[in-house]
């Protein structure tokens, strides 16, 4: 299990406008491509340097591939990263102000304190 | 020596810019009162007539990332670009550029390290809304050099609350011992109770009004001892999953001093979170 890698996916997709759209339109394909090509890229480093060991487990891959943000919350992905990216992808589909944010809260309504640990 | 002319602690609400500049049907009903409160708060900084601003905030996973995460970081650069693509996207924040004050940055780094804080530094720091929000609210003309100080309230393991207070106390000592004739204001932003990406987010009020009431009381009365007696890294999960940002308020209480009542206090109960504004004048607030 790699909360760090979940966060790295959310972080790197969120900061790239084209990736935000790609992930919205094709979550499974984007996750497959990202895990194969981007998961081991060391950020903030010279290009061409990579790690060798980072991979999702099945639950993480499935959650990302289905836009299952309650599951990402359960897995301990950083809530700020998940929220920010999912607002970018889905707020536009809701007419009411904060419509998506309130639906998001409602879908997480089954979680009680203490919430899943986000420490990486 | 430099003079500490104002200590200001504030929430940083990224929607203020959009709300305050919206017109017609786009303008939310709470905007006019919010603007009135912010302009009154702004006057408390203007009146202190500062030359330079030490700005305490926290990067929201923009430049600082989990592969290399500092606990406390001081910017040392001649300029700071500001705001990020996802802040434009979500909040409508403008791109900005601030001047730095490298002399004060160097002093805080050298003396801060010698005082027991192993401060990280950055010579190329793009700052985010934790620092640009108070520029927009308190100094919209953006005409003063800054020294940004970033704290980690976001990515555990975090420093404990007491450490934030101690850093605030140290920042005050360093500002007041800086060999300069500049007038310095320390401006820091954090949160009261706040939930982001959890079931209690975006409610009609902040997620824990009782915590907010106590927090405002601690801050406005300078009750560092009482605050530290109740607030722990664990306890901060209870009022809301992003409430660790309250530790930046605790840092500012450290700057202001134990038992030091705020000279200006205002709050505004908004959806999602309570706004809170505090100003202290260490030397009575005389402008010169």
Image (cartoon, helix red, strand yellow):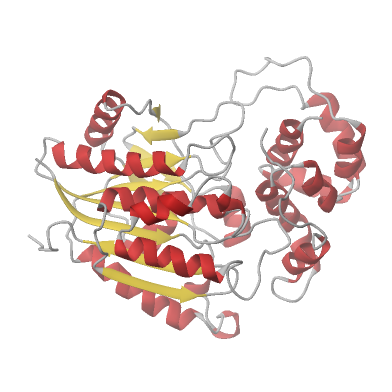
| Residue at the (88%, 30%) spot, across then down | A57
Q: Quadrant of the N terminus of chain B?
A: top left
- Tell me which corner region of the image, top left, top right, bottom left or bottom right, holds residue B283: bottom left
Residue B140 seen in the current view? no
Specify whether residue A81 is in view. yes
Q: Quadrant of residue B141?
A: bottom left
Residue drawn at the location 56% of the way across and 61% of the way down: B92
Q: Is residue B144 left or right of residue B1?
A: right
Residue A118 percent across, percent down from the top left: 69, 41
Rendered position, B24 above or below A11: below
- Position of B151 with respect to A4 (left or right) is left
Nearest the viewer among A34 and B259 is B259
- Residue B157 versus residue B227 in the image, above or below: above
- What's the residue at 56%, 51% (across, down)? B235
Pinpoint residue B125: horizontal percent, then vertical percent. 44, 36
Q: Percent from the top left, x then y, of residue B134?
A: 39, 58
Count up the numbered dots.
0
Image spot of residue B5 (x, y percent): 17, 55
Question: Residue visible at 68% across and 32% down?
Answer: A120
Q: Answer left or right for B200 relative to B37.
A: right
* Side (left or right) of A29 relative to B152: right
Image quadrant in which the C terminus of chain B is located: bottom left
The residue lying toward the viewer, choosing from B85 and A55, is A55
């Amino acid at each position: 299990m790699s909360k760090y890698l979940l966060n790295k996916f959310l972080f790197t997709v969120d900061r790239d406008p084209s990736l935000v759209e790609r992930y919205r339109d094709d979550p499974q394909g984007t996750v497959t491509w990202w895990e194969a090509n981007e998961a081991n890229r060391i950020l903030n480093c010279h290009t061409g340097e990579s790690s060798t060991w980072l991979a999702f487990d099945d639950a993480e891959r499935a959650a990302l591939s289905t836009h299952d943000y309650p599951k990402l919350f359960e897995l301990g992905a950083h809530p700020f990263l998940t929220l920010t990216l999912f607002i970018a992808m889905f707020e536009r589909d809701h007419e009411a102000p904060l419509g998506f944010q309130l639906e998001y809260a409602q879908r997480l309504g089954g979680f009680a304190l203490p919430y899943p640990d986000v420490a990486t | 020596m430099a003079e500490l002319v104002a200590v200001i602690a504030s929430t940083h609400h990224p929607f203020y810019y959009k709300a305050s500049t919206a017109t017609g049907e786009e303008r939310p009903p709470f905007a006019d009162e919010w603007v009135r409160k912010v302009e009154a708060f702004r006057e408390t900084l203007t009146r202190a007539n500062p030359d330079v601003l030490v700005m305490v905030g926290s990067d929201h996973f923009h430049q600082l990332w989990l592969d290399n995460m500092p606990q406390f970081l001081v910017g040392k650069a001649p300029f700071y670009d500001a705001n990020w693509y996802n802040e434009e996207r979500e909040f409508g924040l403008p791109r900005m550029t601030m001047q730095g004050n490298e002399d004060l940055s160097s002093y805080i780094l050298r003396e801060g390290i010698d005082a027991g804080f192993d401060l990280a530094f950055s010579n190329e720091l793009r700052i985010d809304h934790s620092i640009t929000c108070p520029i927009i609210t308190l100094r919209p003309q953006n005409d003063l050099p800054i020294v940004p100080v970033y704290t980690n309230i976001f990515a555990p393991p975090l420093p404990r609350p007491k450490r934030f207070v101690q850093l605030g106390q140290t920042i005050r000592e360093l500002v007041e011992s800086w060999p300069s004739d500049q007038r310095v204001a320390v401006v820091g932003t954090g949160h009261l109770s706040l939930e982001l990406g959890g079931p209690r987010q975006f409610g009609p009020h902040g997620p824990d009004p009782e915590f907010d009431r106590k927090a405002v009381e601690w801050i406005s009365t300078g009750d560092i001892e009482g605050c530290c007696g109740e607030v722990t890294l664990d306890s901060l999960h209870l009022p809301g999953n992003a409430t660790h940002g309250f530790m930046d308020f605790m840092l500012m209480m450290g700057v202001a001093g134990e038992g030091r009542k705020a000279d200006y206090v205002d709050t505004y109960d908004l959806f999602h979170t309570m706004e809170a504004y505090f100003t202290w004048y260490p030397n009575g607030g005389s402008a010169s």
